[in-house]
Amino acid sequence: MAIDQDMKDSMLGTLENVIDPELGIDIVNLGLVYDVDLTDEGLAIVTMTLTSMGCPLGPVIVDQVNTALNELPEVKEVKVDIVWQPAWSKDNMSRYAKMALGIR
């Protein structure tokens, strides 16, 4: 069940529209999305984490991931796996996200 890089890029590009409400940066540049996959049946599987375990906005972000990916014609259903390993750290963030938040 491996998807091609174009589909992966398309899914990640779509997820760049999902903004973390606390930080105001998208979840891809924050490094919250660890992996995306798509089954032949059209099930999109997103493996991601949150900035903290007690993140009150987790359900909001998961809803936004669902909404965003369902806009892709190839996606019939979305499953979001929230994982805590490896733990998220600011090292996961893209250069863009670090600059935007003033983190060195």
Image (cartoon, rainbow, N blue to C red):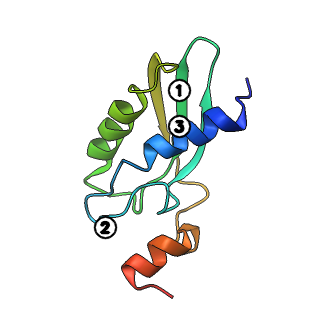
What residue does disc 2 label? Answer: 23
Q: Residue at x 52, y 64 (%)?
A: 88
Q: Amino acid at mark 2?
A: Leu
Circle 1 — which element?
Answer: strand
Give the CA separation, mark 1 to mark 3.
9 Å
What residue does disc 1 label? Answer: 44
Q: Quadrant of residue 26?
A: bottom left
Q: Is residue 80 left or right of residue 37?
A: left
Give the CA separation, mark 2 to mark 1.
25 Å
**Split into 4 quadrants, where in the image is the N terminus?**
top right
What residue does disc 3 label? Answer: 11
Q: Nearer the viewer, mark 1 or mark 3?
A: 3
Sequence order check: which comes first, mark 2 or mark 1?
Answer: 2
| For residue 81, above or below residue 99 | above
Sequence order check: which comes first, mark 1 or mark 3?
Answer: 3
Confirm or deny contact between disc 1 and disc 3 (CB under 8 A): yes
Residue 38, image x and y in percent? 60, 25
Circle 3 — which element?
Answer: helix
Residue 77, image x and y in percent? 45, 19
Q: Residues within 10 Å of mark 3 (few under 14, many from 20)?
A: many
Q: Which mark is residue 83?
A: none
Q: Amino acid at mark 1?
A: Ala
Circle 2 — which element?
Answer: loop
Residues 58 and 100: in front is 100
Q: Residue at x 53, y 37 (%)?
A: 11
Residue 45, image x and y in percent? 55, 30
Number of callouts in the render?
3
Residue most extreme to the top: 41
Sequence order check: which comes first, mark 2 or mark 3?
Answer: 3
Q: Quadrant of residue 99?
A: bottom left
